[in-house]
Amino acid sequence: MSSDRRPYDPRTVELRTFHDAVPGFLDGSDTPRDYLERCLEAIEAREPEVKAFVVTNIEGAREAADRSTERYREGRPLSLVDGMPVCIKDLYETVDMPTQMNSPVYEGWQSNRDAAHVYALRRGGAGIVGKTVTTEFGQATPGPTRNPFDLSRTPGGSSSGTAAAVGAGMLPAGSGSQVRGSIQRPASYCGNYALKPTFGALNRGGGHSMSPSQSVLGVHAGSLEDCWRTAFHISSTVGGDAGHPGLYGKPALEAAVKPQRLVRLETRAWPDTEEETREIFERFVSEVAGHGVEIVSRRDDERVEALEQALLTIPGFMFDIFAYEMRWPTWGYRDMEGDLLSEAVLERLARGEKLSPEDYRNRLAMRDKLRQAFAALADAFDGYLTLSAKGPPPIGMPVGDPVYGDVSSCLGAPAWNLPLLADRGLPMGIQLLGHPHEDYDLALRGRWFAQACLAS
């Protein structure tokens, strides 16, 4: 750990929140502009070492905050996110800043539009402070961002910049995205609350994903409430992806709901998980059981064992699906700017070029079979507990193994990262999964976890 920082403790760490500032905006004791200035002070203090941002638009954010301040003075805020300063993962377009995707292919490139979720946030009165670092096209070469709790370690990827900005207390919320574990893992490493939603629940328009049949837009935040409000605002404004119904639920979270029966999932990642991390997780599960929640594992229920076995099939289809789907646009990049692509991207493209349409159909059928096995458990449990990462963030820039994120991603299921634990003085997230469209119900159960497990 950095010598000037104390070991991480989820019970005492204070990330930046927004929803609890709104009453001050309404009674005039605080303003969105003053709130933004406090965020900018934190950015000035932490950004030189954390390196979360690719580009910022501070003046644009101040103008948005001033407009929001006036609306609150008049008692007419636009939404629950009016006045919230946010950041945007640099895979998504912004009309006022370039979108470069950590690739020299797109250096300096700027579209003439906002991505759907950026448009929704602006329309609700949020201020876009800047674009955050990602990996090359969200899948390969990492950027310069460091973990805010230990500068010698990675923040994870590919939503590295957003996770680090939230973890460093620079901003209350920002957008991320996930194909494998790109929301869950960096959220775990950086101590964020984060929602990887049901597939298609948040509109990805204006984003650049190389794996469109599995990628999702999600939200990182310093609190469960801000995370949900931000996600729900996006979905209620611009919907989900075409053909998908968006997020179900209410604009703000209701009271916590205690789960009655949860599955403890090992997944294929468990054998390779660090021993100390496994022990911490086992103690956590025992603590949950001590609160009167029934915990069901593969040894207790043959249906859970069947699901665990089905999850072992993921490597048989996942990597080929990704490689096949990335052929376009990567073919065009290679034809025009091949020398600007990393070896990792070119190797994945080569894999995709070996696959036929029949191969792709076969892999999709394998994924559908897994989803059917999961669907068979619908309504049997209140959720599924597993880890978000195999251990603490690695030293250096390797972004870590996304294997725990593969579960919800391949299932198209919602998952929350809950920053409830510490592992060797660093953040450790718990992943709470559910069935498609249970995002809101999981959030209420996540609120119970936060209340039960973070009580001092």
Image (spheres, rainbow, N blue to C red):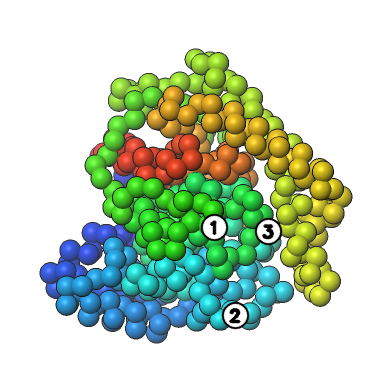
Q: Mark 2 points at which residue?
A: 110
Please tell me which residue lies in front, 287 or 252: 252
Question: Quadrant of residue 291 in the image?
Answer: top left
**Mark nearer the viewer, 1 or 3:** 1
Going by the numbered disc 2, the residue's amino acid type is Gln
Q: What element carries label 3?
A: loop
Above or below 303: residue 271:
below
Give the camera-side residue of 236 and 333: 236
Q: Which of marks 2 and 3 is nearer the N terminus?
A: 2
Q: Residue at the right extreme?
A: 354
Picture coordinates of residue 47, whole percent (x, y) = 46, 70
Q: Which of the numbered marks, if any, corresponds to residue 242?
A: 1
Q: What residue type is labelled 3?
A: Met
Image location of residue 169, percent across then percent down? 37, 62
Quadrant assignment for the C terminus: top left
Mark 2–mark 1 distance (CA, rounded to whole Å): 24 Å
Tag 3 residue: 210
